[in-house]
Image (cartoon, rainbow, N blue to C red):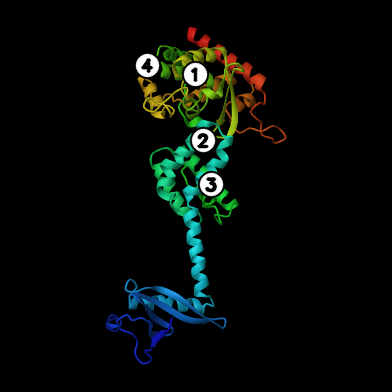
Amino acid sequence: MRCLKICATRMKLTDIQIKAIKTTEKTIRLWDGEGLYLEIRPPCSKGWRFKYRFQGKEKRISLGAYPKVSLKEARKRLDEVKRLLADEKDPSNERQSQKRLTAFNAANTFETVAREWWETMSSGWTVSHAKDVLHNLEVDIFPFIGHRPIGEIEAPELLAVLQRVVARGVVETAHRELGNCRRVFGYALATGRASRNPGEDLRGALPPKQQANHFPAITKLDDVGWLVRLIDGYWGTFVICSAFKLAPLFFVRPGELRSAMWEEINFEAKEWRYLSTQRNVDHIVPLCNQAITILQELHLVTGHGTYLFPNRRDKERPMSHGSLSEALKALGISGEEHTWHGFRTTGRTILEEVLHYPPGIIELQLTHCIRDPLGRAYNRTTFLPERREMMQAWADYLDKLKEV
């Protein structure tokens, strides 16, 4: 197609001049100077273009359609393109690179990469742990940075999201979610979707987690006897009553107790096997005879579902922490006197000071991070026979305290 060039060597284009031009059967070019021109193609197409030379070759690049891009805006875009040329960069190549980057970012948001990481890793987790990780991401993380390209997220942006969790008063949850975000960014690094891990920059940025020995706990023998007798007389629901009876026998973390799943309970082996989310290690709780009796009765009530202690409103989720706290209050026990986490302190104290079990065995059963003399971490089966004997002795001792 032939092209009619209308040059403006002495005067630049004006909006009035552009509007006055009528389209013809030929392509018209209205030159504004410095390589910028408006190309008018039949029947009614108008677009800004820039003619330039790069490394000895003549090239052209579009600067947008008229009138969406005005004359003033076209000149502004021309200045940006000329700055690229001044830096010895080809505007066409830069534009293609930007398009590829935009498409890459759109396909690699934080949520996209996080879900891919979850799919990759969750096959090695328990079902309950996998659900908890995904639920926390969906509730606390995705709504705020899920849409963001993962390679563009900086540490302050991630910190602001986690501070929302801290503001709810669940510091431990914020720490767990930081750990998961750190692993997502690590996965993005390994798969070429990010160049750094902002989660690593947040070490020490969150308030410290409350240590186990800071949780109020009843440890005096007379008071422990009173506590277990009080639990036996609890008048609440059967499910909460079962949780109360198992808590001192297991002395696991409250979150681990309330999220226990029936598929993790092995009556034949007399074991409860699950992933400790606090240490991210597989753990075994030997089931004493008293625990098996309680679990068998509980199985008649909740065994048809997933969780030992299902949520009253949503059976597909475990009991809430609030339900446990309210149950303690119903017994007349204040949070300053004893907590669900305090059962761990109760067990640790009496097992060592009264029943004289080795601290290493006790700490292992508590899933605390302990190592042997060679510096190797104990695995879940370390001293398992000794732990079985200890857990049965502990349950028998609690029965004796009830009778005092």
Residue kind at label 4, given as amino acid type? Gly
Chain-order first, disc 4 or disc 1: 4
Q: CA distance from mark 4 to mark 1?
A: 15 Å
> Could you say which is closer to the camera, residue 240 or residue 348?
240
Identify the mark nearer the N-term, 1 or 3: 3
Tell us which disc is closer to us: 1 or 3.
3
Residue 358: x and y, percent? Answer: 64, 22
Disc 1/disc 2 C-alpha distance (Å): 24 Å
Q: Amino acid at mark 2?
A: Ala
Task: Kindly indicate the quadrant of the structure image that contains residue 355.
Answer: top right
Q: Identify residue type, mark 3.
A: Val
Is 27 drawn above or below residue 264 in the view shown? below
Q: Nearer the viewer, mark 4 or mark 2?
A: 2
Q: Earlier in the sequence, mark 2 or mark 3?
A: 2
Instruction: Judge from the rendering whether residue 64 lies leftward or rightward of residue 386; answer left or right.
Output: left
* Mark 4, residue position: 236
Pick out the residue farthest to the bottom: 10
Q: Which disc number belongs to residue 130?
A: 2
- The answer to which of 350 and 205 lies nearer the viewer is 205
Q: Is residue 2 above or below residue 89?
A: below
Residue behind mark 1? 246
Residues at badges 4 and 1 in contact (C-beta under 8 Å)?
Answer: no
SS for callout 1: helix
In the displayed structure, would residue 40 be above or below residue 192? below
- Mark 1: amino acid: Leu
Give whichever of discs 3 and 4 has the lower sequence position: 3
Q: Tell me if mark 4 has few (under 14), some (14-19) or many (20+) residues whose alpha carbon lies within 10 angstroms of its own.
A: few
SS category of the residue bearing label 4: loop
Mark 2: few, some, or many residues within 10 Å (few <14, many ≥20)?
some
Residue annotated with mark 3: 184
